[in-house]
Image: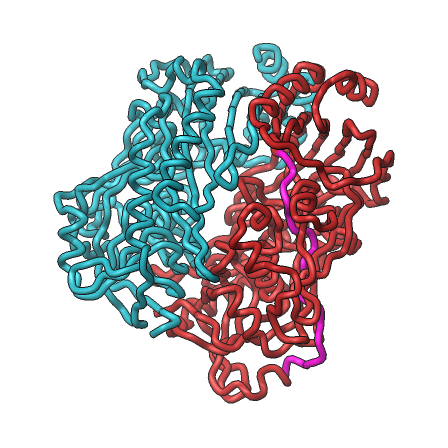
Chain colours: A cyan, B red
Amino acid sequence: MDRILSQAKKIAQQAELFQISSRIIPVNFEANRLKEIQAKESITNALRLIKGGKIGFAQANGFIEPNKLVEMAEETCQFGMPAKFDFPGSTVYPKIDIFDSQVEKFSLEKMVETGDRLISAVTKHTPYIVCEATVAKGIITVNIINSAGGSANYDKSFFNISVEGVLIRNEDMLFVGDSLSSCRPIVDIEPIVEEVIMQLELARRNASLPTRVMPAIFTPRGVASALISPLISAFNGKTVFDGASPLKDKLGLQIFDKNFSLWDDATLPHQVASYPCDDEAVPGQKTSLVDRGVISNFIYDLQTAALAKTKSTGNGDRRGGVPAPSPSSLVIGSGDVTFEYMIKDIKEGLVVDTLIGAEQGNILNGDFSGNVLLGYKIENGEITGRVKNTMVAGNVYQLLKQIEAVGKDARWVEGFLQTPSLYCSGLSVASKDG
Amino acid sequence: MRNQITDALKGRKADYIEIRIEENKSARLVYRGKRLEEVGRTSSVGGNVRALVKGGWGFVSFNDIHNLKDNVDLAIKEAKLTGKEGFELSPIEPVIDIVKPEEKDRSLTLASKKQLLDDYNDIILSTPKIQTSSIGYSDGQKKTTFTSSEGTYIEQTRDDINLRLTAIASEKGEVQQMGLSIGSPGDFSALQDLQQQAKQIAERAAALLAAPQAKGGEYTVVLDPVLAGVFAHEAFGHLSEADHVYENERLKEIMVLGRKFGGKHLNIVDGAAVPGFRGSYKYDDEGVRATKTYLIHDGILESRLHSRETAAKMGEKTTGNARAINYSFPPIVRMTNTYIEPGTLSFEDIIADIKEGIYARDWYGGTTSLEMFTFSAAEAYMIRNGKIAELLRPVVLSGNVFATLSNIDAIGNDLEMNQGGGCGKRGQMPLPVSNGSPHIRISRCLVGGS
């Protein structure tokens, strides 16, 4: 790494080298049986230069001659964006517990056994279900050095279990599933088994809803599936700076219900989305986005923060190559109402667990619209069955402006979002039956 | 390199082993509004080994391609741990072939690509009510070397270019957008002369600000060729991928060959052997020769898309549809160029007798759960009394595959292929594909709305 950086410093005013290496082992089950074991090793070096005040970038996956990487980055400098920031110098990073050596020691045989246990628990409950499952573990190592003397590195371990089952009755397909992630090995599969069995129980019968506007409860999975994408887009500092976020001039204003709070937190222990530093060596932090309904901040990387005349929130993310703002873990504050109590409150309504196609709407505007892959009908305070051939459409700003109740049932979904169930009024439902 | 690969396979014990080595070079340009936010180049070298032992697979991917023997051993070890009951892969003739890359003009500089995109961006940004724009361009060349323990050795080089232009309009807290996706298997001229289209998407994004939202419910819907192509891909293409079907007894019953899925006028094709598109190639990532496959022929389910494993297990012919997005993934069953064959009707014929319906154009996205699909149109109009009427906000269409295919009651004569975007499956995206169709009409299609 030092060789690349010192070569880069010869031709550019500033330089930064980001290196990530990973070793990931997924164990895949298909059709209720062990199917494939993988081992994936990768190493990437990404070089950012600032030359003549402009940013250049090149990335190499696998081996590359240092001078070739420098040459590639230099070629792009002439067209690059004017750099508005300086690379961060030496600093102190928070200590965050995201590495567990037990992950490395967790054997392939035990991973296979965990997957087998998971599938047999689900198939024992529902014999004809066909499951796909993955038990995966991995170690990621990040190293960042820059010409300002900044230097950061950390190891992260992760462990992930997911299952998806399909149950076919005639031409009716029912999809159920759930996943769990942690930086430590997951031995207790009970939470995921319980969730899937609950889905199967609630979906035992089919029910139909009329086409009209009605109250709806979004389960934690439903919040992740329907509501979170428009929010992520709106709180991205870049969308805000470009004036394309509906929240662009709403800082300090009450936009959501006072029971709604949202924050980004890179410092939570054992969470797979946590980190001591982001991908440009800025310390990870907790950032409030919505405080009791009031917009309190947006998320930024170095360049976007500089353009917007504010500070990076430690959210520079490299998944797309050049760093861009992206959330770490998102948390929606929990409330004090049980899921059962919310159901009891509704005469006729819908529980939304999974939508397909929700992110295809105009998410910039906060709109979502999708087919209910998994959702239940509420009738006179009870869940009466699973709905099918049903589409919902809504706008997160309208729905979350007045929330009927926030659940006390917060949980992690998809490894990056902790949320309770949210009970909203006024969701448009269109159904084939009604 | 070839010697090293053959050497690594020597004496290794497994039912089947393959080694894929890739070299990849790509460039990216990303604009947000006036800012050219990213100009970057990427170079990749990597490979993988896949081994089959008693029906279980081991897969190892890596960047260090000089340690093949150890990686072969690891893949075999994993496969042994997985395998219980063996099966034979569908047989293919081993081939040795070096597929020469097509002659293409690769001399374009980063500066000339940038100039063209600047031009489109200026057109979009100078349109009234446009708040900002977003442009993503990428091009790449990938050289793959495939070697199997059965004696196959194939070198292939593929080019791919992808462009997405998005215009974002804003007024009084409302935000609307309209996009254009163009792709090509390496021919840069496909991206030239789009000034008119750039202007059009900007004007339409602005017009959407004042457009009403469709009322949710069931409609007779007419899809333009772009959206109908997405429909063919989402609604039926994915269901035709045999890996969804081959180990699911109940789905096998539903997807039995010879079953009637639509009217006699309905023909749906997939094939990498159809030349000249982003989903075209000579051999797939298992070294199987590409074909052209009728998924639906005269309304009847005729065949499906296979890897060597799914073909073997279902007792059907290989189709050359096993594809991997890059060396860090094993090949899985994927579509290539998917389209509905043209019929005889003109667009005017198709809308003539619709009293109230929706004309949906251009795609924004699409996804499927196999049974249910949803896809979104970027642009929609009401149809009233056989005529195109007012502009609507973008609509999301959804339905049940089995019911919807038989609800296609008119097929146009104007087939067009669309090469923008890409397909995602099991974490492998965006894979270069193309899809297409003539205008089609669907009776009773569910539309989400207010």
Q: Position of residue A413 (x, y in %)?
A: 34, 39
Q: Quadrant of residue B327?
A: top right
Q: What residue sits 35% from the left and 55% below the top?
A: A366
Q: Is residue B347 above or below residue B75?
A: below
Q: What residue sits 38% from the left and 17% below the top?
A: A99
**For this view, does B317 lie left or right of residue A126?**
right
- Is residue A103 visible in the rendered image? The answer is yes
Q: Position of residue A234 (x, y in %)?
A: 36, 48
Q: Position of residue A258 (x, y in %)?
A: 16, 49
Q: Count up the numbered dots.
A: 0
**Nearer to us in this view, A55 or B358:** B358
Q: What residue sits 28% from the left and 63% below the top?
A: A427
The segment highlighted magenta reads B330-348
Q: Quadrant of residue A361?
A: bottom left
**Which quarter of the rendered picture does the N terminus of chain B lie within?**
top right
**Nearer to us in this view, A328 or B151:** B151
**Which quarter of the rendered picture does the C terminus of chain B lie within?**
bottom left
**For this view, does A418 lie left or right of residue B2?**
left
- Is residue B136 visible in the rendered image? The answer is no
**Nearer to us in this view, A60 or A343:** A343
Q: Is residue B333 magenta?
A: yes
Q: Is residue A301 magenta?
A: no
**For this view, does B139 lie left or right of residue A185?**
right
Q: Is residue B381 above or below residue B100?
A: below
Q: Is residue B14 above or below residue A329?
A: above
Q: Position of residue A164 (x, y in %)?
A: 43, 43
**For this view, does A153 lie left or right of residue A39?**
left
